[in-house]
Amino acid sequence: MSSSPVLTLHGAHDLSTAVATHAAMLEASAAGSLRLDLSGVESADVSFVQLVLALRAGLEARGDALECLASPAVAEAFSRCGASLPAN
């Protein structure tokens, strides 16, 4: 999936940033498979985990894929939620 577009996110991602994050994810994934570079995300909550999982489900339903490069904060948020990160 190396030719897939990359969406890079930084900083804190929580309910207060969910609308903007969702819009960015939808725009970046409009053409198909997507790579999320979350290595710069410093904190994330359950709303962010839900956005990533919904993005993955939407892409997979279209036959596309989601690849993530996660920061420790993102990995921890997924772990707290009992969810699996999309494949790296």
Image: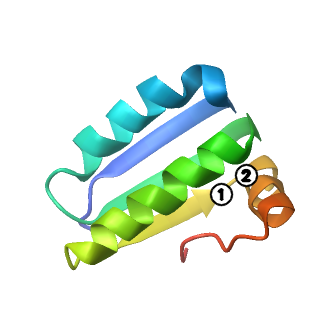
Residue 42 placement (x, y as % from top left):
76, 35
- Up/down of 88 relative to 10, above or below: below
Q: Residue at x 53, y 30 (%)?
A: 18
Image side of residue 44 versus residue 55, left or right? right
As rendered, which of 73 and 81 lies closer to the eye?
81
The amino acid type found where label 1 is placed reads: Ala
The structure's colour scheme is rainbow
Task: Decide: few, some or many residues near mark 1? Use Cα within 10 Å; few <14, some 14-19, many ≥20.
Answer: many
Furthest residue toward top: 16
Q: Quadrant of the C terminus?
A: bottom right
Could you tell me if residue 39 is visible in this image? Answer: no
Q: Residue at x 58, y 52 (%)?
A: 50
- Up/down of 23 relative to 7, above or below: above
- Label 1: which secondary element: strand
Say if mark 1 contacts mark 2, CB within 8 Å. Answer: yes
Residue 67 placement (x, y as % from top left):
45, 68
Name the mark on residue 74: 2
Q: Residue at x 53, y 37 (%)?
A: 9
The amino acid type found where label 2 is placed reads: Val
Q: Which residue is mark 1?
A: 70
Could you tell me if residue 5 is visible in this image? Answer: yes
- Label 2: which secondary element: helix
Residue 5 placement: quadrant? bottom left
Q: CA distance from mark 1 to mark 2?
A: 6 Å
Residue 55 placement: quadrant? bottom left
As rendered, which of 61 and 31 lies closer to the eye?
61
